[in-house]
Image (cartoon, grey):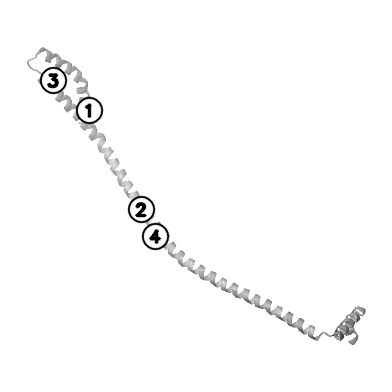
Amino acid sequence: MKRLIYPVLLLGLAAFPALRAQASAETAASSEKGEGSLKGWEWANFVILAAGLGYLAGKRGGPFFSARSRQISKDIADAAELRKQAEERAAEVERRLAGIESCIAALREEAQNEARAAAAKAARADLKRHSAELAVDLAERLIRERMTPDAQDELVREFIRHLEDPAGPESGRN
């Protein structure tokens, strides 16, 4: 049935100019009819045009709107999946941020402990240096107090004896 509609529609459209020319000739010949027969052809033309457009809309429109509907449904499903993935990523980022805060607190604590340890080590080194300076000063003072001209002479003599006999007085005692 659908195959017959298309050829009939084309035949009607092809015959329309000839029918219209005949109608206008008849209209001119019989002025008493007026525009009545021409109006009939205009309505017939409208019906044929509307039928043709309806046929094309039914034939082409159905698959077009069906495909468009499927595409829209697919796009909605894709958008829902993308939204779900974005929400999962956002939740993961929030979990990481919560973990970062505890890591930062642990790093701060570790840095403070290391700073305290370094300060203690520096204080011990400073204390050792100060103790050594005090010991050197004390030894210098004791040496100055005990160093008399006789003691200096004895030290010089002992040094000279050591230069003369490199084995020293200890080697002779054995």
Q: Is label 4 in a helix, a strand or a loop?
A: helix
Residue at left offset 57%, top offset 73% = 116
Give the x, y percent position of residue 32: 7, 15
Is tag 1's residue or tag 2's residue first in the polypeptide sequence? Answer: 1
Q: Earlier in the sequence, mark 4 or mark 3?
A: 3
Q: Earlier in the sequence, mark 3 or mark 1?
A: 1
Q: Is residue 65 positioned above or below 49 on the image?
A: below
**In this view, 57 is above or below 38:** below
What distance separates the C-alpha of mark 1 from that of mark 4?
A: 60 Å
- Disc 2 designates what residue? 83
Residue 150 lies in quadrant:
bottom right
Q: Which mark is nearer the camera, 1 or 2?
A: 2
The total number of labels drawn is: 4
Task: Provide the residue designation for mark 3.
Answer: 38
In percent of the image, x 37 and y 56: which residue is there? 87
Q: Position of residue 83 (x, y in %)?
A: 35, 53
Q: What label does residue 6 carry, if any?
A: 1
| Quarter the N terminus occupies | top left
**The C terminus lies in quadrant:** bottom right
Tell whether label 3 touches label 4 (CB within 8 Å). Answer: no
Sequence-first tag of 2 and 3:
3
Judging from the image, what secondary structure is the residue with disc 2 in?
A: helix
Given the image, on which type of amino acid does mark 1 rest?
A: Tyr
The residue tagged 4 is 91
